[in-house]
Structures are given as C-alpha cells and as structure tokens.
Image (tube, coloured by chain):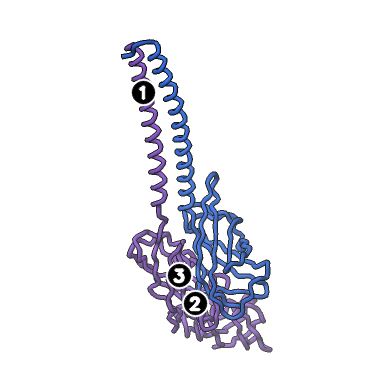
Amino acid sequence: MAGSSVAAMVVGTVFIMIFGLATVSLVDSVNESIKNADYELPEPRVEIVSAFDQEMSTGPVESLSISNPGSGYVAEICTVSGATGSGLTFSITVGGSGEITGVTIVSAGNGYTELAVRDVDCPSGGSSAQVSIDDLHDQNNISIINAGSETIDLSHIYVTFSNTEEDQTGLPFAPFVNHYSGPNLYLFPGESLTTDDFALDPSVHGFTIDADPNRAFLAIYDYNDAESVTIT
Amino acid sequence: MANGPGEIILRCAGLIVAGLVSGVLLETWDDMDAALEDRGKEGAADVRTRASLINDPLNIAWDNTEKTATLYLQNSGENQLDLDTVGVFIGATSLTASVADGSTTWIPGDLVQFTVDDTSNTLDYTGTNDVIITITVVSSATGYAGAHTVSEEVRLVTI
C-alpha cells in the first residue's frame, strides 16, 4: 500500500511541475504583451532657428548688361570666363559687325559676384566683348536645432516653403540632403546646424528662383515647427 | 495508509480524474498562452507602425475640378509600410490614394507622395476649408501586419 502512496506523490509532483512550467510560460507571455504596450516610437523634436531669403555675397545671376559689345560674334548661347562662379549661360543677339546687342540669361548658375565685369566666352569665338553682372538672385538658408533628447537622422527632416499671402505652397524637401555639404549625418541633442545657401528650384522646392516664400514649415515624424522666412 | 483493494481503486480513480482535469486545464492554459503570444506580436507590429503627414497643414492644395490633392506621408515607424493599402478620408468621405512619385518600397524615414482622389465626386470645396483628414497605413511585414490611423486638422486651399 505504501507503494501506491509514493506513486500518488510522484504523480502529484509531476502535475505540480507541469502546472508550474505552464504558469511560467503564461507569465512570460503576459510580460511580453505588457512590454509591447509600453514600447514607444521615437519622438524627435527639431525646431527652426531661422530661415532667410536674401542676396548673399555670391549667387546666381539675375541680370546682366553689356559693358563692351566687342566684335565678331554670332547669335548663340555663351558664358563668361574668369569668374568665380559656374553654370551661367546666356543667349546673345548681334549687330552687323558681330557686336553684341543684347543678352538674355538662360541659366543663372551660381557662385558669381555682383558688379563684376567678365569676358564673354562663346563657342564660335568673337573678341573683346564683356558683360557686367548687375544683380544676383536671392538665396535661402535654414538653421535648425535639435530641441529634443533623441539623436536625429538628418535625412528624415523635411521642410516646405509656402507663400501665405498668395496661398502658394511648395514641395517638401530634405534640406540636409539637398543643401548641406558638411560631413554630419545626425543631429545630436542640443546641436544646431545650418544648410548651405541655396537658390529656389521649382522641381525641388516648388518655387521659381525669384519667388519669395514667407513661411517655412518643418516636419519630422509627428513633430512640426513653422517660422516666418526673413526676406531682405 | 490504504486499507484494501477498494481504496486502491478509489485512489486510482482519483488519479485518473485528476489527470483528465489537469489535461483540460493545461490545454486551456496553452490556448491562453498562445492567444497572449499572438496578441503580443500583433501589439508589437501595431506599436511599430506609424505614418505622419508632412504637408504644411496650413495650406494643402485642393483641385476641385479633378477632386484631387497631393499628400506627403513619412514612414515614422519602424516597420516597412504597404504602399497599396493606404486609406484616406476627408471628413467621412473615402478617397483613393495612389503613389505619385514612383516609390516601390516605403521604408522607415522615407517620404512618399500620394495623390488622393475623390472618385465619388462627393467633396466640393471652394476657397479655403478647414477639414479633418484621416489616414490609415498598414505594415507590410509577413505574419503580423500592424496598422496605424492618424487624424489631422488641415486647411484645403482650392486651386
């Protein structure tokens, strides 16, 4: 008879162990569920410190005038030589002896200085003509600060310009992908950063180079910030 | 101590009944465990699924002729999102959302441009209108797909 009692104790102990293991597994699942419920996605906070739309010391050319008409030119697309910038092209009209009578900007380029007189450089040649860079287009830059406690991937920050007076809104662009030449990839808590100077481009910003958007709206994940653009 | 065969039979019967009850209990326990585990995985997928509206809410252009608007949505979660199951409502009106920038994947951090279209021609806006826009996204993870819904107050400006 003692044997049956021992057997009952063994079976009981096995049951208790099985129930114990099942309870542990159940508690683990409950804990896992609670952990998921407590999980929080990143909540970055980036604020715009300033946004400017102004003429910089160098930039895209807005207007040209003829300083010296030269001679021997034909009507075609030309550029200038000896300048600091690049990308400026303009079409020329010529008179009877090949002197330049008019210039029309085709591409404003960038990096040019105002009030500089430059030699005209045309594919078909010509001699002595010079143009004066009379005015530069405005350019923009944006400064931001990481106002939160999380490190932020710069490529996740988007800015949209708009002109509230004319109900025009631009396209969202990543300022630190499109307009930042520095080495940083992340913005650490408290760190601030400024884009390079950039000219507006309809395909990137939704505004033409001569537009003056007056509002900059920043969005990153669920956080937004907006500032007025300082236009000078 | 047992006093005879009858008691042994009773004891054996008790063990059998206890075993059967234990089996039922353990099975129930196992079902609960599986349900909790499934719910945990679903919860994990849900909590990691999120999208955010990147448009300036002050001014979202609305084409009242075509009944369309352009929305920019950022994947602000940690799961890849399904581009084909984005749901958009303006007020109570459902709109179709289609990818407008050629994106084929929507990984965390990425911005995707959508054209939303009121194919039912229900919405009729002129001037500026403040509305509530509701967006639903679903993660494209295999097994458990998380879902996220966000509502934003925006100003539609008719162009």
Kindly report the distance in space between the C-alpha atoms of the residues bearing marks 2 and 3.
36 Å
Question: Percent position (x, y) of residue B1?
Answer: 31, 14
The chain letter under disc 2 is A
Q: Are marks 2 and 3 on the same chain?
A: yes
Whichever of callouts 1 and 3 sits on the residue coming sooner in the sequence is 1
Element at badge 1? helix
Q: Which residue is mark 2?
A: A83
In contact (CB < 8 Å): disc 2 and disc 3: no
Query: Which amino acid, by three-letter code, is at mark 1?
Result: Gly
Return the residue nearer the eye: A78 or B61. Answer: B61
Mark with earlier residue (1, 2): 1
Give the amino acid at mark 2.
Ala
The quarter of the displayed image where residue A56 is located? bottom left
Mark number displayed over residue A12: 1
Q: Which residue is mark 3?
A: A218
Q: In the drawing, does residue A219 fall left or right of residue B105? A: left
Which residue occupies 42% across, 49% down? Answer: A36
Quadrant location, the C terminus of chain A = bottom left
Label 2 neighbour load within 10 Å: few <14, some 14-19, many 20+: some
Q: Secondary structure at mark 3?
A: strand
Disc 1 with disc 3 on a shared chain = yes
